[in-house]
Amino acid sequence: MVGDAIELPPFVKMDGTGREEMKQLHRESVEAWGASFVEQGREEGLERGMEQRLERGIEQGLERGIEQGLERGIEQGLERGMEQGLERGIEQGREEGVVAGQRDLLVGMAANRFGADAVERLSGVLDGRPSRRLVADAATLIVSCGNAREFAECLRELSGD
C-alpha cells in the first residue's frame, strides 16, 4: 500500500488547485449520502407507520367484531330464551289444565260413588300440583275400591299417611 499511487479526480492538481471543486464534490457526496439516509428513514418510517396503522385497524376491527358478536349473541340468546320460556309456559299450562280437568272429573266420580267424605279426602291428596301418576293412581282407586271405607284406606296409603 505504501507507495501505491492514489488516483485523484481530474480537476485536482498536484499544485493545490482544484480545492474548491474537491470541497464541492465532498459537499455533494455528503448531501447525497445524507439524502439517501433521509430517504431510507422516510421509507422505514412509512413502513412502520403503515404497520402500526394496520395493527391498530386489525385490533379495532377485532374489538368491534367481538362487541357486535356479543351483542348479537345476547340478543339471539334472549330471543331464544323467551321463545323457549313461552313454549314451556304454554306446555306447563296445558299440562296443569289437563291435570286440573282430570282432578275435577275424579272428584266428581268419587262424590257419586263414595259420598262427600271421599271428596274431602281425595281433594286433600290431589291438592297442589299432583303428578300424572298420582292422578292415574287415584282414578284406579275410584274404579277398584268397593266402598268408601276401602277407598279412604287406599287413599291414606297412596298419600303416605
Image (cartoon, rainbow, N blue to C red):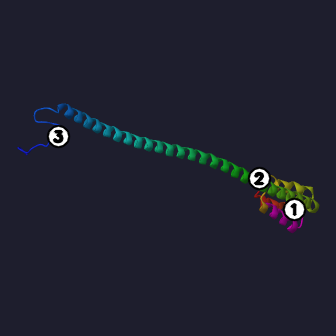
The local secondary structure at tag 3 comes to: loop
The local secondary structure at tag 2 comes to: helix
Q: Mark 3 points at which residue?
A: 10
For residue 90, above or below residue 34: below
For residue 63, above or below residue 139: above
The local secondary structure at tag 1 comes to: helix
In this rendered view, identify the residue nearer to me: 135 or 155.
Answer: 135
Q: What residue span does the magenta drawing correspond to?
A: 134-147
Toward which corner of the image does residue 21 lie, by quadrant? top left
Residue 34: x %, y % from top left: 29, 36
Q: Nearer the viewer, mark 2 or mark 3?
A: 3
Name the residue rendered at 85%, 54% in the picture: 123
Residue 136: x %, y % from top left: 81, 64
In this rendered view, identify the residue nearer to me: 72 or 130.
Answer: 72
Label 3 is placed on what type of residue?
Pro
Q: Name the residue under label 2.
A: 89
Label 1 is placed on what type of residue?
Arg
User: In what quadrant of the picture does the C terminus appear?
Assistant: bottom right
Between the C-alphas of marks 1 and 2, the distance is 39 Å
Label 2 is placed on what type of residue?
Gly
For residue 46, above or below residue 16: below
Name the residue rendered at 47%, 45% in the picture: 54
Is residue 154 toward the left or the right of residue 51 in the image?
right
